[in-house]
Amino acid sequence: MTQRIPAARRARVDLRSDTVTHPTEAMYERMRAAPIGDDGLDGDPTVRELEAHVAATLGKEAGLFVPSCTMANLLAVLAQGLRNEQAVLESSAHMYTSERGAATFTGLFYLGVAGADGAMDLGRLEEALQSGGHRLKTSLVAMETSHNNAGGTVLPLDHMQAVYGMANAAGAAVHLDGARLFNAAVALGVAPGAISRHADTVSLCLSKGLSAPVGAVLAGGRSVMARARTLRRMLGGTQRQSGIMAAAGLEGVRTMGGRLAEDHVRARRLSDGVNRLAPALSATVPQTNIVQVETAGTGMSNAEWVAALLAAGLLVRPWGRTRLRCVTHRHIGDEDIDAAVRAFEMVLNAR
């Protein structure tokens, strides 16, 4: 009897996300040997080591290990915002488009501010920060870098500095959704702390390009992190012998940042290859490891493109009505990029 093979295993090249990365051998060894404890009682030593290392790397006083970056972002809002106030975000930010349901827990109103390439318009931000009369007080401003929906773009440091200064002058805290912060740091050629200095709290995902299997760290001031730790328990985010997972994250933070440049180079290789198929297809020119492919001129729906590319051995994700998202990562080599371009060309010619 023929065994049915899942589609994700049939496809040779998986560009759906950098979350598909598997742990390195060094991570597995760290997980096996990690000192562990009960993080809900008297603490887990490996978790504490990870929290302290990330906090120091990002120039913050303390860190908090959590199951996901979504929870880290939610905790940042809960710990720094007050009910009946508002959080201001760029209107295509992941926290706004995909995590806005968190408002049901926070009691805050999420206000989206239009921007370009993931950077909110400073004039509109200034308007949003004005309070009094019928306007809600802004208790938190959030930025994102690299910016997922803007195709992995990186916020300029002078823009981040301006946002931070405006928010602080208005009495608002600043949170940075840094799920792919290390990608942004590599693209800018700076240390991660040079970016995170423009925010009061920062979230860092461990399970994307850094290749850990799970988890994120929220970093910030000691008092804010103490509140976040209490709130984490309320949300069910306290784990027990979580040092096993934290050990992989610690290895990722310490060793995987530098190699992200390879993913950026391969993303550009993919973009160049797809753009040779113009005008039917066009791809964004990436700053980091995310490429968006525009399919509007092909006469095929995104669902048709996803299915056809899967049959050709390539996994991608639909991103809106006429775009596909491709993300390079540690398991993707030059030959995989070339195979991906051939798959796009094959589907295009077979229409």
Image (tube, helix red, strand yellow):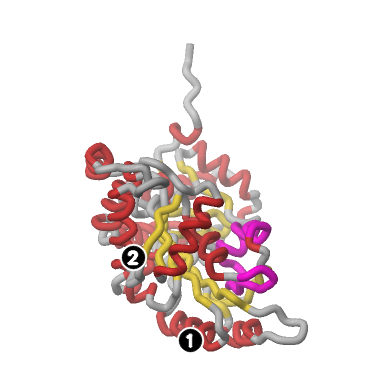
**Relative to 250, residue 92 above or below:** below
Where is residue 334? Give x, y as percent: 31, 51
Q: Residue furthest front?
A: 42
Three-letter code, disc 2: Ala
Three-letter code, disc 1: Gly
In which quadrant is the C terminus drawn? Answer: top right
Residue 83 colored in magenta in the image:
yes
Q: Can you see residue 278?
A: no
Where is residue 11? Give x, y as percent: 44, 37
Where is residue 157? Give x, y as percent: 40, 80
Instruction: Name the residue carrying label 2.
Output: 55
Is disc 2 in contact with disc 1, using a CB cutoff of under 8 Å? no
- Tag 1's secondary structure? helix
Query: On residue 165, which mark appears?
Result: 1
The residue range painted magenta reads: 82-105
Residue displayed at 42% across by 46% down: 40
Q: Is residue 178 left or right of residue 182?
A: right
